[in-house]
Image (cartoon, coloured by chain):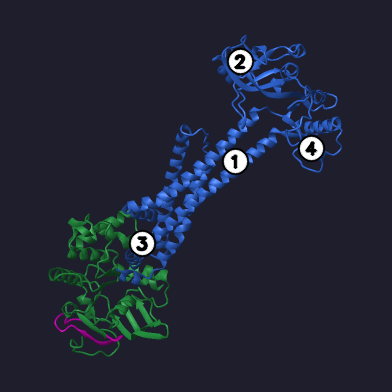
């Protein structure tokens, strides 16, 4: 069963640096494999192709930024990648599992097990303390209360908030709130961390702080997809994918960092991008 | 997400919106308390009426002159004619003609002023036979009742009610005292034990005299042998309908009436009185309970309204929970559990208020309130059902929210 084998891969995921692994051809299935994906919104007689034939492959351990101006389709792409929306055409494999045909209940489970979300608005529940916010995904995963608390506190420790576990979001700064959100994304040990404009609501210090955290996670071998419209944020990633009018206009290794990155994905890609946004 | 988690989340959400949850519960609380109180009032008055009527005497048939049916011909209305006589009573008492009739007491009633020195008291004076005491299921608190000797001697003796005694003499220990009416001096030979009142007259305010004394010495005139009412006691409760039939055929024969429809008398039983009275109070209870049920319905709509507000207020929370992996079923259950908790809490508090009200209210109004366990249990069940039923729609709406739309909403 595909699901069973995918489970084994995620189990061995943490701890080790993956840079060395990246140098050889990866044995496991790519984390994200989009093939000619289209998303069509039909409103009355009008139909809009928000995504028009996107093919993208992201391997385990990659740190990818998806860039594009508003209206480019990058949010739609993020929703598809995050299994928050279903695609109209094409196919999508997430960590080897075909999610294109899944129903709402299966998608909820996939989101729970495979994806850790970090949102621009943080989306913490204001009535719950930090650790109870971090605990939320594990409630739906069916973990026992004791295990949940231990894991939540461990995740908060990893983002440097071990002294804030019993604080409510209102008692934390924006940067700390985003760290809680990152801890919540980490706690279920997902295949993919999907961050949607994670620095959009942060000042420059907190932005640097959050990006430093993503760097750290990347060092630990996490697969990170970051959606942004800010070049300086995107430049922290090892690979930049640019989207415009529902198609990928460029897909390149970031020239400044990660020279050792091995690009994957069968499609011809434009190089030397960085001017079209 | 197991049930305990759902319960915990629902409870946390209710507690974090205390005022709103409290006001929602208030709607159900009032409805439930109203149902318990109205049902209690209805049952209480039914019990009271039942107790009063059975206090009048058991296995009792009441023969009144006149007819309630109206067909052609000139006949007196119910109670207006004087067609019953002491001879009818004697015939009904015959063991041969009416074996199912146990005892008969004819009654001749009039209203007279009794005088004791300077004290005057107008009361109902009842001329009857010694059998009256057992037929009407009364007892004496002191002295003795009328005897056949009093009857044949047309003695000037009386047995009076406790209220009459208090009004005339200021106490109930009055055996041997005297009073005057129609220029005749009567001696009190006994006092009746308290029996309360029926719907029209006080059972404790009357003077019982021998029938012959009333007919010949007090009322006099041409209608000496006519009586107001004949009380007929069946030999046992099982023989009541047989006694009814015997009394009817016997009286028809005596009055030379051939068809039952043109009878010049009416026989009613305690049972028919009881069923009339209870059906009246039952109708009233149903009416009041209906009003209370309406207020419950309004409370239920309140729950739905609040849950819908809660869904739209917490759209982002729902979106987030879904993004983090909550399946639609878990979201639906969470809102359903919240609505059910509101219903249950409202129901329990309402039941408590209703029970307290039922204990306290009788101190202020003269009616008995009966706490019916069925009404309490039933209304709590209804409150929970209201929570569930009116929670279904908001819960379904929450479950249907698309996570991206929910997350985007501000």
B263 and A1: which is toward the camera: B263
Q: Which residue is mark 1?
A: B281
Reply above or below: B292 against A162.
above
Q: Is residue A249 magenta?
A: yes
Q: Residues under labels 1 and 3: Cα distance?
A: 55 Å
Residue B24's spot in the image, x, y percent? 39, 52
Q: Are marks 1 and 3 on the same chain?
A: no
Q: Which residue is mark 2?
A: B115
- Frontmost of labels 2 and 1 is 2
The colour applied to the residues of chain B in this rendering is blue
Q: Which residue is mark 4?
A: B75
Q: Is residue A36 visible?
A: no
- Magenta extent: A244-261
Mark 4 or mark 1: name the one nearer the start of the chain.
4
Badge 4 local density, few (<14 within 10 Å), some, or many (20+)? some
Residue A140 badge: 3
Tell which subunit mark 1 falls on.
B
In what element is the residue under mark 4? loop
Q: Residues under labels 4 and 1: Cα distance?
A: 33 Å
- Chain shown green: that is A
* Residue projecting furthest to the left: A205
Residue B344's spot in the image, x, y percent? 44, 49
Q: Residues under labels 2 and 1: Cα distance?
A: 40 Å
């Amino acid at each position: 069963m595909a699901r069973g084998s995918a489970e084994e891969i995620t189990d061995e995921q943490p701890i080790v640096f993956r840079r060395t692994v990246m140098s050889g051809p990866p044995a496991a299935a790519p984390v994200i494999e989009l093939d000619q994906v289209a998303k069509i919104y039909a409103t009355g007689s009008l139909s809009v192709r928000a995504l028009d034939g996107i093919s993208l492959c992201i391997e385990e351990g990659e740190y990818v930024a998806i860039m594009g101006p508003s209206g480019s389709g990058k949010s739609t792409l993020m929703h598809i990648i995050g299994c928050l929306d279903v695609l109209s055409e094409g196919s999508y494999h997430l960590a080897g599992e075909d999610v294109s045909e899944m129903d709402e209940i299966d998608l909820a489970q996939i989101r729970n097990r495979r994806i850790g979300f970090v949102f621009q608005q943080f989306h913490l529940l204001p009535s719950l303390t930090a650790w109870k916010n971090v605990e939320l995904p594990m409630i739906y995963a069916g973990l026992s209360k004791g295990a949940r608390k231990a894991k939540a506190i461990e995740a908060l420790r990893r983002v440097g908030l071990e002294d804030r576990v019993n604080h409510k979001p209102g008692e934390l700064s924006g940067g700390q709130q985003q760290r809680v959100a990152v801890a919540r994304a980490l706690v279920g040990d997902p295949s993919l961390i999907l961050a949607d404009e994670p620095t959009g609501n942060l000042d420059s210090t907190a932005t640097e702080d959050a990006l430093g955290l993503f760097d750290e996670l990347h060092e630990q071998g996490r697969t990170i997809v970051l959606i942004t419209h800010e070049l300086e944020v995107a430049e922290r990633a090892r690979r930049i994918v640019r989207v415009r009018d529902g198609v990928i206009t460029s897909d390149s290794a970031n020239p400044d960092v990660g020279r050792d990155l091995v690009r994957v994905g069968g499609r011809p890609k434009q190089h030397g991008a960085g001017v079209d946004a | 997400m197991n049930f305990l988690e759902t319960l915990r989340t629902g409870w946390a959400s209710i507690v974090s919106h205390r005022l709103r949850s409290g006001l929602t519960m208030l709607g159900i609380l009032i409805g439930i308390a109203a149902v318990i109180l109205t049902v209690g009032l209805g049952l209480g008055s039914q019990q009271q009426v039942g107790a009063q009527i059975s206090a009048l005497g058991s296995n009792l048939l009441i023969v009144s002159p006149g007819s309630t049916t109206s067909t052609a011909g000139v006949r007196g209305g119910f109670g207006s004619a004087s067609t019953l006589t002491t001879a009818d009573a004697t015939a009904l008492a015959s063991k041969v003609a009416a074996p199912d009739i146990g005892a008969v007491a004819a009654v001749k009633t009039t209203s007279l002023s009794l005088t004791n020195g300077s004290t005057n008291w107008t009361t109902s004076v009842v001329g009857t036979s010694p059998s009256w005491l057992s037929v009407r299921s009364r007892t004496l608190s002191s002295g003795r009742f009328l005897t056949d000797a009093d009857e044949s001697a047309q003695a000037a003796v009386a047995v009076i009610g406790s209220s009459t005694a208090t009004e005339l003499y200021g106490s109930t220990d009055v055996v041997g005292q005297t009073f005057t009416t129609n220029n005749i001096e009567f001696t009190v030979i006994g006092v009746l034990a308290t029996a309360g009142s029926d719907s029209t007259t006080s059972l404790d305010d009357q003077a019982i005299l021998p029938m012959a004394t009333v007919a010949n010495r007090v009322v006099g005139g041409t209608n000496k042998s006519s009586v107001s009412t004949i009380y007929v006691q069946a030999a046992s409760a099982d023989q009541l309908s047989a006694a009814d039939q015997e009394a009817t055929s016997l009286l028809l024969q005596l009055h030379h009436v051939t068809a039952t429809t043109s009878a010049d008398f009416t026989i009613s039983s305690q049972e028919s009185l009881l069923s009339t009275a209870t059906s009246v109070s039952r109708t009233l209870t149903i009416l009041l309970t209906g009003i209370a049920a309406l207020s419950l319905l309004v409370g239920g709509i309140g729950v739905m309204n609040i849950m819908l507000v809660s869904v739209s207020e917490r759209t982002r929370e729902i979106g987030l929970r879904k993004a983090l992996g909550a399946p639609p079923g878990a979201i639906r259950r969470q809102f359903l559990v919240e609505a059910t908790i509101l219903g249950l809490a409202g129901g329990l508090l309402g039941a408590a208020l209703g029970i307290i009200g039922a204990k306290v209210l009788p101190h202020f109004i003269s009616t008995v309130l009966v706490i019916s366990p069925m009404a309490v249990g039933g209304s709590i069940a209804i409150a929970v059902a209201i929570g569930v039923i009116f929670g279904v729609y908001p819960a379904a709406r929450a479950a249907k929210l698309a996570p991206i739309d929910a997350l985007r909403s501000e």
